[in-house]
Amino acid sequence: MTANLTKTRKDIKLLIVSGERRGESVGRSKYNEIEIHRTNAVSKHHRTVHQWRPVIDYSERDIWEVLKRHKVNPHPCYRAGWNRCSCAMCIFSTPRLFAGIRELYPKEYALLCQDEKILGFTLDNHCDLETYIGSADSCVYHGDKEAIQSLLTGEFPVESVYVKGKWKYPAGAFHGAAGGPC
């Protein structure tokens, strides 16, 4: 939506489809399946925006089973060990997940550490990022080289969307809030 602000600003009807599930958090447990989106502006811009969460009541197993049934290759972050795509550098990440960021993205990790110093406060209220991670092992699963390569390069070839052979659960599946194979 934000990529086309001039096209989506007014005189339009939009449907935002997102993949939140109630089982992901206490906050998400209260979400509606469909609702008016916060960018709705009927009277001012003649823009009607709804949000639909079609998998809101699915379990994690339900999600993986749909992907398995259709032989959809899970996103590389799941295959490399993360339990959720949006959690790579989330402030709620565990030490092992941050150790994975430090391993795969050392420049971005260094910028996070620098940001703590510049801003004068830390990610964790009790210690800086380096102390928080300590000697935690990285959560990165090195058994899927293609997934790691995709994460490092940002390249996701179209031919990798579907699994050609036997489908298997990714390393990051079924780890709840703890994340990945950690």
Image (spheres, grey):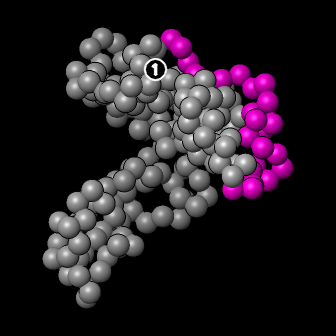
Q: Residue 34's spot in the image, x, y percent? A: 35, 66
Q: Is residue 163 magenta?
A: no
Q: Is residue 131 magenta?
A: yes
Residue 168 in view in this figure: no
Most extreme residue toward the right is: 126
Residue at 76% from the left image edge and 35% from the top image edge: 130
Residue at 30% from the left image edge and 11% from the top image edge: 165
Above or below 63: residue 134:
above
- Identity of the amino acid at label 1? Ile
Q: Residue 43's spot in the image, x, y percent? A: 25, 88
Q: Is residue 12 left or right of residue 151?
A: left
Q: Residue 100's spot in the image, x, y percent? A: 61, 27
Residue at 47% from the left image edge and 51% from the top image edge: 21
Number of residues whose C-alpha sits closer than 10 Å to that of mark 1, classed few (under 14), some (14–19) or many (20 or more)? many
* Front residue (pair 31, 145): 145
Looking at the rendered structure, the number of numbered marks drawn on it comes to: 1
Most extreme residue toward the front is: 118
Q: Main secondary structure of the magenta part?
A: loop
Quadrant in which the N terminus is drawn: bottom left
Above or below 114: residue 182:
above
Quarter location, residue 113: top right
Q: Residue 70's spot in the image, x, y percent? A: 27, 28
Quadrant in which the C terminus is drawn: top right
- Bounds of the magenta span? 119-143
* Front residue (pair 128, 65): 128
Residue at 47% from the left image edge and 39% from the top image edge: 85
Q: Which residue is mark 1?
A: 148
Residue 157 in view in this figure: yes
Q: Secondary structure at mark 1?
A: helix
Above or below 52: residue 116:
above
